[in-house]
Every structure is written in C-alpha cells, then in structure tokens.
Image: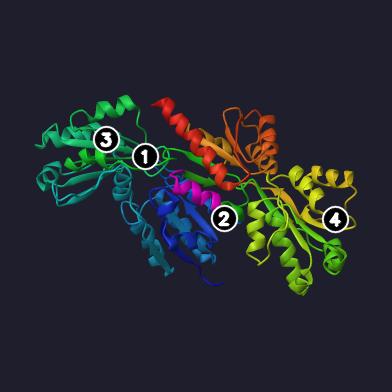
C-alpha cells in the first residue's frame, strides 16, 4: 500500500471569502479531514459527501482529542494511504501547534505540505475597522498567546511588551483578560491606553468592545462577550469608530442559510455575500438524473412529433441537453420547435445553449406557465415537458382542461440531502439574525427532514413564491415572500427584512 500525504491547512478566521484557493481545493479533494472548532460553518459546508471527518474540537484550551492523539491520527491515516487535511482555524503555524504535528510525520517520513491561512490576528481587527499598525500611532505589532498549557495565567514578560510601544494582540486570552490588563498596567502602561476585545470576528455575530486598559474587563463582562475573541491594546483601537465597515453593509450582521441544490446555490450565495451576509450553503435537496430513461430516449428520437419544448427548471434543461448529447442527437433536430420556460433562471440556462425562449409567463410558477401556454399553443400542437418525477400538477391540469396534448416525462428525481457536520438546530441557535432562504417547496421539505424534531417556529423563512411560502407555514415558520420569483428579488427581500430589524433595534 502506498503512503498517503498530510496537508496542514489554515482555514482563516471564519469568513469563507478569506479561504485561500489552495485550501478550498484540498478540502474538496481530501480523503480524511481533521477539523477544529474554529473552522467556520461556511467552510465546513464545502466538504463533499464521503469524506472521513474527525472532529478534534480544539478551542480555548479545550479539546475533544489530545494533541498527541491528533498527531498520531494524522500519522495513521497517512500510513493507510489516505490524503489527509488537518484543517485549522487561522494559520497552522501561528499558535496552531502545526510544528508539533509535523514532528511525528517527519519522524516517519510522511510527506506533507503547509498551506498558510489568513490569521485572525490581522483579519479580525480589519473587520472591526482597526488597522493593527498606523504611522501616527505605532510602527510595530506583536502577537502573543494569552493561553498557557496547564496554567490559568499566561507566562508573559509584560515589562518587555510595554517597552515595545507597539500594538499588542493577544490570541486565546479572554479567560485571562483581567490578568493581562492589570499586568500591563503594573508594568507601566497607562490605564487609559485604548484597548479592545473583538468577538467572533468576520462572522455575522462579530462584536467589538472598545474601552481603556483599565475599564476593558468590566466592559467585556457587562457585554457578556464570549470566545472566540481576541484582545488588542494600543492607540489604533480608537480608529474603530471611524473605520468600521463590516456591520455597515446592507446585510452586515445577517446570517443566511441557503437551501438550494449545491450546483444552483452559487449565484444566490454570491449575491448575499456581496451585500455583507454570512452565507451557509446547506443544500436541502439534490437533483438526480433518472437513468435508463426509455420514455425520454423515445421522445428524443421522435422530436419531430412535438411543436413545443417546455422547461420548468434549470435542472430539466441540464438533463435534457446532457441526454441529447449522450444519445448522439444533433441539436439541429430542435429546429422548428418552440420553447417555453417557467422563469428567468430557466431562460438563462437555455440562452447559454444558444436557444431563445418563445413563451415565458410574467409570474414564474406552474399555474401561470400553464396559462401562458394556453394562449400560445396552436390547435393540434404537442408539447414535450421534461421535468421532475414529482412535478406540479397545476401545469398539466390546465393543459388537460384546454385539450392540449403533451408528454410529461420525468427526467430527474428530487432527493433530500443531509449534512454530517451542520445541523439546522445548531445553525439557527448561533445567531438571532438568521434567515433561511427557500426557492421551492421541496427545499422546505428537505430542510424540515434535515431538522428532525427541531422547533422551527423561530425560523424566518424567506421564500420564492406562494407555494414555497405555504409549505413553510405548514411547519410554523415566520414567512416572508419575495416580490418576484427571482433570485435577485429573494436577496432584496432578505435585505429589506434585515434593514427593518436593524432599524427597530437601533
């Protein structure tokens, strides 16, 4: 058996946008991933099904697995021939104990690579509007671990730190905050030196407390700040008041769970991230092409029998044209066929294949598509409708009522997804400003199944279309409906809700 390889990968502070391209590639190609508690949910959501996952749970001195056991597990998995990613919050070599994990690998001649990550020491202050250096205030920055093994008090030369006159950044030091502040004062730093604690940096739940060195512990206690958090000491902390930006974005402070199938989620996710949201892609459904589809093969070989192609989803477009190519049928066989699409996303999928749409309803749902077809289909024309196995009955009911001939052919199944790492109950509990975006009734059903017995009455469901909203209401969710049945309108509705919420709180 060949020997595997280990990559120590820095996942950054949490925001998936700060993940390096190399880190993302390795996460999506690994056989085994050992991850800690500081890895962001949106990053964990990138891990594909089938990867062996090992939670080592390291945070603020607590761990599911001891450090020596982590190193031993890396060795054993690599020796068994696996490609192993050790996924760490921040950077693996900045208080990440990456060097310790490499020692055992080196001893046993296991090949390895190190992938640096964006460190929270710089990124978290940046997201809070604090530059760690500024020519008017300091010319150096110093990063110190605020945690020491087997001790509540870090072993730090505070006298030396005070003499440096630079920005001081303490990682993993919240539990020793009072000791750190008092020790700096005892070493000669003035009590009114600006200082800050930054909680959950780069996430929707990030908070900052800016005070003085003398008052910071009391302010942090009053605000009930929790880990993960970093401590900053220095004049630069005063700049947060004028340089803050993350929370000022339209969706700053919002966390949105996107339930669309993974291959369709990117456009909505990208739009929401542009607006400042923390986006967790948690696909509740997946579309799976129906194999050995004899009815579809017969339809493709008899395209001359149809006058219209009717598409009710992007998935239907993808499967239809994929099977067309697999069956070695020239696309020119579609010449003369008119094409109907249920909405703009489906229309765009057709346009990408060089095909224009002849019929599309103003309201993007099955009822209005059926009505539009009754106004455009001529007597004697037959329709081919390649769509989901369980499709909306309203479309065919309208066609039947008007005597329109059609072949309704299932080309894909919609199956419910699960996620081994992320559970709706956990995601919903992490932030009061969490919205769940639903683009179809099937995504609602998939999310509900994934949630098991979780009480969903507190969920703010933002839905495309009344059918989707009706399904969400069945499960007690608070429902808002986008003005139009489009991704942009869905993003606009979430932005509107969040603006109202911030206005009420402010």
Q: Which mark is residue 265?
A: none
Question: How far separated are the C-alphas under marks 4 and 1?
Answer: 54 Å
Q: Nearer the viewer, mark 4 or mark 3?
A: 4
Name the residue beneath numbered marker 1. 248
Q: CA distance from mark 1 to mark 2?
A: 39 Å
**Mark 1 or 2: the one toward you:** 1
Residue picked out by circle 2 = 52
| Image position, residue 339 (x, y; %) | 75, 59
Q: Which residues are magenta?
A: 266-277
Let me know if residue 300 appears in the view: yes
Mark 4 / mark 3, whichever is N-terminal? 3
What x and y, as percent, mark residue 377? Answer: 82, 54
Q: Is residue 473 left or right of residue 258?
A: right
493 falls in the magenta region: no
Q: Which residue is mark 4?
A: 378
Measuring 82% from the left and 67% from the top, which residue is drawn there?
Answer: 300
Q: Nearer the viewer, mark 4 or mark 2?
A: 4
Q: Earlier in the sequence, mark 1 or mark 2?
A: 2
Q: Dot 1, how many residues are within 10 Å of its Cα: few (below 14), some (14-19), or many (20+)? A: few
């Amino acid at each position: 058996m060949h020997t595997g390889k280990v990559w120590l990968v820095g996942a950054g502070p949490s925001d998936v946008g700060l993940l390096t391209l190399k880190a993302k590639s390795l996460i999506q190609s690994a056989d085994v991933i050992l991850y800690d508690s500081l890895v962001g949910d949106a990053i964990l959501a990138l891990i594909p099904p089938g990867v062996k996952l090992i939670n080592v749970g390291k945070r603020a001195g607590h761990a599911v697995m001891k450090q020596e056991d982590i190193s031993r597990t890396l060795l054993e998995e690599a020796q068994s021939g696996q490609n192993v990613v050790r996924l760490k919050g921040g950077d693996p070599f900045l208080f990440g104990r990456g060097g310790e994990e490499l020692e055992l690998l080196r001893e046993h001649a296991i090949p390895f690579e190190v992938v640096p990550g964006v460190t929270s020491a710089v990124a978290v202050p940046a997201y809070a509007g604090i530059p760690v250096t500024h020519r008017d205030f300091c010319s150096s920055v110093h990063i110190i671990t605020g945690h020491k093994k087997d001790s509540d008090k870090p072993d730090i030369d505070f006298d030396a730190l005070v003499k440096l006159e630079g920005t001081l950044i303490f990682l993993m030091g919240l539990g020793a905050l009072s000791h750190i502040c008092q020790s700096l004062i005892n070493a000669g730093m003035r009590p009114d030196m600006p200082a800050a604690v930054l909680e959950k940096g780069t996430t929707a739940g990030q908070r900052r407390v800016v005070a003085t060195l003398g008052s910071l512990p009391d302010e942090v206690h009053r605000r009930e700040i929790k880990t993960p958090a970093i401590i900053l000491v220095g004049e630069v902390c005063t700049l947060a008041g004028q340089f803050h930006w993350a929370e000022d974005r339209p969706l700053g402070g919002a966390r949105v769970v996107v339930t669309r199938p993974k291959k369709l989620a990117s456009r909505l996710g990208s739009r929401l991230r542009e607006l400042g949201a923390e986006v967790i892609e948690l696909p509740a459904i997946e579309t799976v092409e129906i194999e050995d589809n004899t009815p579809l093969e017969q339809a493709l070989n008899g395209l001359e029998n149809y006058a219209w192609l009717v598409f009710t989803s992007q998935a239907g477009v993808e499967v239809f044209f994929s099977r067309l190519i697999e069956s070695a049928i020239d696309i020119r066989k579609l010449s003369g066929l008119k094409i109907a699409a249920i909405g703009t996303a489906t229309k765009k999928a057709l346009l990408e294949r060089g095909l224009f749409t002849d019929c599309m309803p103003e309201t993007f749902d099955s009822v209005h598509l059926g009505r539009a077809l009754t106004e455009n289909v001529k007597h004697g024309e037959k329709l081919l409708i390649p769509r989901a196995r369980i499709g909306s009955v309203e479309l065919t009911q309208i066609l039947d009522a008007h005597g329109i001939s059609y072949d309704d052919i299932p080309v894909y199944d919609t199956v419910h997804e699960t996620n081994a790492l992320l559970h709706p109950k956990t995601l919903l509990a992490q932030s009061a400003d969490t919205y769940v975006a639903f683009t179809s009734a099937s995504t609602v059903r998939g999310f509900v199944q994934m949630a098991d017995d979780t009480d969903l009455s507190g969920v703010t469901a933002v839905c495309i279309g009344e059918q989707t909203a009706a399904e969400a209401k069945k499960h007690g969710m608070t429902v808002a409906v986008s003005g139009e049945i489009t991704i942009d309108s869905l993003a606009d509705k979430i932005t509107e809700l969040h603006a109202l919420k911030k206005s009420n709180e402010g």
